[in-house]
Amino acid sequence: MQYRTFGRTGWKVSEIAFGAWQIGGTWGKVDDNESIETLLYAFENGINFVDTAVAYGAGHSEKVIGKALKQWNDQKIYVTTKVAPLIPSMTTLDLDGKPSIKGRYPDWYIRQIVEGSLKRLGVECIDLLQLHLWLEDGIYELEWLETLNALRLEGKIDKIGVSLADIRPDQGVSLAKFGLVDSIQVLFNIFEQEPMDALFPECAKTGTAIISRVPLDSGSLTGTWNENTYGEWQEGDKRHMMYRGNRFKETLQRIDAIKDVCLPYYSNLAEAALRFALYPKEVSMVIPGMRNKHEVDLNLSISDGKKISSELVHLLKLHRWKHAFYQ
């Protein structure tokens, strides 16, 4: 396992971290005992960072992680969770309309969420608390930051981060410039390459750590999908909604083109995708999901110190594709 410095925090974190959305049950049926065994196996093999959120199975992912941590008594495991914005029922946030952050992260609400997360995770202090959605006027509407700093002083959280909305890396540029948070999480993969344009360079200037999520594009960049894959997903599986209509067919066509580009370098598309996500020096880690020990082994095999060819990175620039499939 290779380790990287987590921005200006000084933490040494595994460059392959554990993305724990899937163990919350949002991506199809999961077995909690297998999830706990998978987490422990990951820890045993050098993974020391777990990314979860209250929204991942309505706290279920946090509960499973808490059970695994209770059984773990070796090296430090950094745990990060997220607090989603307060959105009244029967309403939605139109991000294109640039909604305000005012009222979305009130003090009482953040504290309520943090207390619940501490209980579910079974810890006294959350290593990194991230806002699960960033709204750009948060640069000067600072109620959220005042509360989080107070929680730091109280010893309930250690570091502060923000998880940006999907395919909106531009939202984080000013946030990084002012250095208001310790980390920024962003969607970054072979398709979604925009973070390299402005966000990553700005983060480097202020020592803001980068957590790279969805490196395998929700599974498409594993290279294992075929024309029958969509029909195998249950309606409750998030991918069934994401790749509805013509989206699945278009994705397969794009994947075939990427495979052709990568084949002279890597026979396995997943390896190329993970190495690509780790290529920028600003990235502290990638957080692929892992359902079982086999998937842990596949991800860990990439952490061998070997970098992807800069020539291949250049060729893959032609395959940038901004696609809002979470909507």
Image (cartoon, rainbow, N blue to C red):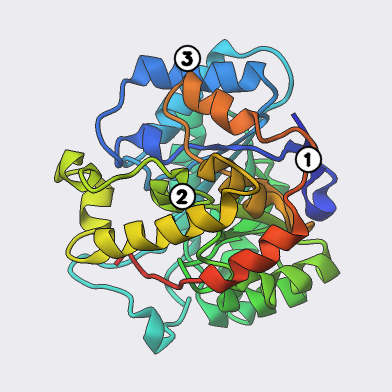
Q: Are marks 3 and 2 in contact (CB under 8 Å)?
A: no
Q: Residue at x 68, y 59 (%)?
A: 312
Residue 150 point in image, percent of width and height: 66, 55
Judge left or right: residue 294 versus residue 141: left
Residue 69 shows up from this direction: no
**In terms of sequence position, does the residue under pointer 3 or pointer 1 come before the other?**
3
> Which SS class for mark 1?
loop
Kindly identify the amino acid type of the residue bearing the numbered disc 3: Glu
Neighbour tally class for label 2: few under 14, some 14-19, many 20 plus, Cα within 10 Å = many
Mark 3 or 1: in front is 1
Real-space Cα distance between discs 1 and 2?
20 Å
Judge left or right: residue 81 versus residue 10: left
Residue 119 shows up from this direction: yes
In the rendered view, tell whether residue 198 sits above or below residue 120.
Answer: below
Residue 284 point in image, percent of width and height: 73, 49
Name the residue beneath numbered marker 3: 37
Picture quarter with the C terminus: bottom left
Real-space Cα distance between discs 3 and 1?
28 Å
Residue 216 point in image, percent of width and height: 49, 49
Kindly identify the amino acid type of the residue bearing the numbered disc 1: Lys
In the rendered view, tell whether residue 37 sits above or below residue 317.
Answer: above
Q: Which mark is residue 177?
A: none
Q: Quadrant of residue 280?
A: bottom right
**In terms of sequence position, does the residue under pointer 1 or pointer 2 come before the other?**
2
> Which SS class for mark 3?
helix
Name the residue beneath numbered marker 1: 306
Name the residue beneath numbered marker 2: 221
Kindly identify the amino acid type of the residue bearing the numbered disc 2: Leu
Q: Are marks 1 and 2 in contact (CB under 8 Å)?
A: no
Observer-nearest residue: 245 or 188? 245
Residue 247 point in image, percent of width and height: 26, 64
Q: Residue at x 21, y 56 (%)?
A: 241
